[in-house]
Amino acid sequence: MRIGGATRDSMMTLIPMGVAVLVTVVLLGGPEDALRTLERLGYDAWMQVGGWFRR
């Protein structure tokens, strides 16, 4: 019995993920703005978690 998927199965996952990333980057105004927004969200989430541990 073979465990795991074929190459085409992994492509069925990668293609929609790639399209989702592309659409997200375009909607956020380009790769630079998208990365800046993701960085800001990550920083805010990190500070929120840090705040929870300090209480």
Image: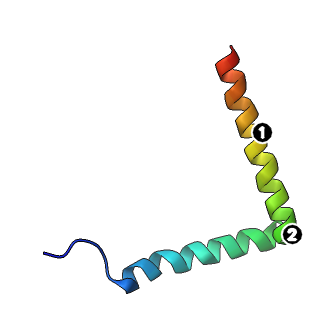
28 or 3, which lies in front?
A: 3
Residue assigned mark 1 = 44
Q: Quadrant of the C terminus?
A: top right
Which residue extends farthest top? 55
The x and y percentages for residue 47 are 75, 32
Question: Residue flagged by tag 2: what amino acid is it?
Answer: Gly
Q: Is residue 2 above or below residue 35?
A: below
Q: Point out residue 10 in the picture as x, y percentages from the top left corner.
A: 42, 78
Going 73% across and 46% down the picture, which residue do you hit? 42
Q: Report the side of 17 relative to 46 (left or right).
A: left
Tell which circle, 1 or 2, labels the residue nearer the N-terminal end.
2
Q: Residue furthest left?
A: 1
**Residue corresponding to mark 2:** 29
Residue type beneath disc 1: Asp
The mark total stands at 2
Furthest residue in direction bottom, as rendered: 8
| Mark 1: secondary structure | helix
Within-10-Å neighbours for mark 1: few <14, some 14–19, many 20+ = few
Question: Which residue is found at the position 32% from the left and 82% from the top?
Answer: 6
Kindly identify the residue that appears in the image at 80 percent across and 69 percent down.
Answer: 27
- Label drawn at residue 30: none
CA–CA distance between discs 1 and 2?
21 Å
**Badge 2: few (under 14), some or many (20 or more) residues near its Cα, within 10 Å?**
few
Q: Is residue 43 above or below residue 1?
A: above
Seen from the viewer's position, the closer of residues 29 and 48 is 48
Answer above or below: position of 37 versus 48.
below
- In the rendered image, residue 37, in percent from the top left (x then y), is placed at 82, 55
Query: What secondary structure is found at the residue carrying circle 2?
Result: loop
